[in-house]
Amino acid sequence: MHYLPRPTQLHAAPRAPRHSLARILALGLLALAARLHPVSAAEPEADAAWLAEHYTKFEHRIAMRDGVRLYTQIFVPKDESQAWPILLTRTPYSLRPYGVNEFLDPRGSFEQFARDRFILVRQDVRGRHGSEGEWVEMRPYRTNKKGPADTDESTDTWDTLDWLVKHVPGNNGRAGIFGISYPGFYTSMGMIDTHPALKAASPQAPIADLFQGDDVSHNGA
């Protein structure tokens, strides 16, 4: 388990790189360590209209090193009082609703992070929904990469973060990644050969062995 730093570290200006084990704290502890402000009865419900009021939504197809483009939703706070950190989740599931003027009702961690003004990024992985490329179940990590055609979830995460810190307005050059279950697997893969901007990662209950319980093959069917 790797741990996310406190939000003050993610929100702070970039510092000289340190050993990855020393700079990564569990995202699952973020709410506790960060003293994220609670939602009071006086605050409006965080529905789609609330999100549209406080965030600008962008859609991009970000090119990976082999030319495959991955569909990416980016929610940028309209609050320009400071630069904000990026929080990425990568998923094989649908990112509905699609369209820059279509906003989801934020729930759970998405709502809390939105209230704390993170730049929220969601991405369809290769071969899924809005993204190009071939879908591979639990795509394995490539240990011997010889060129741009040798891609995996680690390189896709690296390329995505590299594009985000260079092109998303109002970001502070620091990023975290998190996910639960299958998105937790992508978080785990994204922690390997990490981009310098990645300061925090939390793979929560990631899938690890699809043969255990025969969840995918179903006895060969």
Image (cartoon, rainbow, N blue to C red):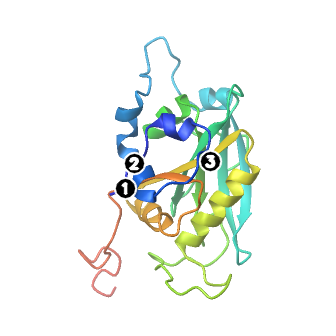
Q: CA distance from mark 2 to mark 3?
A: 31 Å
Query: Percent x, y for residue 188?
Result: 42, 64
Could you tell me which secondary element the residue under label 3 belongs to? Answer: loop
- Quadrant location of the N terminus? bottom left
- The mark nearer the N terminus, 3 or 1, is 1
Q: Is residue 138 above or below residue 26?
A: below
Give, as a three-letter code, the residue at label 2: Leu
Say whether marks 2 and 1 touch (CB < 8 Å).
yes
* Residue located at (60% from left, 26% from top): 50
Q: Is residue 200 left or right of residue 173?
A: left
The residue carrying mark 1 is 2
Q: Determine if residue 195 is in view.
A: yes
Label number found at residue 97 = 3
Farthest-out residue, left: 213
Q: Is residue 218 above or below residue 198?
A: below
Q: Is residue 29 left or right of residue 60?
A: left
Mark 2 surroundings: few (<14), some (14-19) or many (≥20) residues within 10 A: many
Quarter of image, res 134:
bottom right
Tell me which numbered mark, 2 or 3, is placed earlier along the sequence: 2
User: Mark 3 is on which residue type?
Assistant: Pro
Query: Left or right: where does residue 30 sit relative to residue 175?
Result: left
Task: Give percent across and percent down for residue 195.
Answer: 58, 62
- Tell which circle, 2 or 1, labels the residue nearer the N-terminal end: 1
Q: Secondary structure at mark 1?
A: loop
Residue 105: image location, x then y, percent: 54, 36
Q: Nearer the viewer, residue 206 or 176?
A: 176
213 and 68: which is toward the camera = 68
Q: Amino acid at mark 1?
A: His
At x 34% / y 33%, what residue is drawn?
A: 32
Residue marked by disc 2: 25
Q: Real-space Cα distance between discs 2 and 1?
A: 6 Å
Estimate the spatial distance between the alpha carbons at disc 3 and disc 1, rounded to whole Å: 31 Å
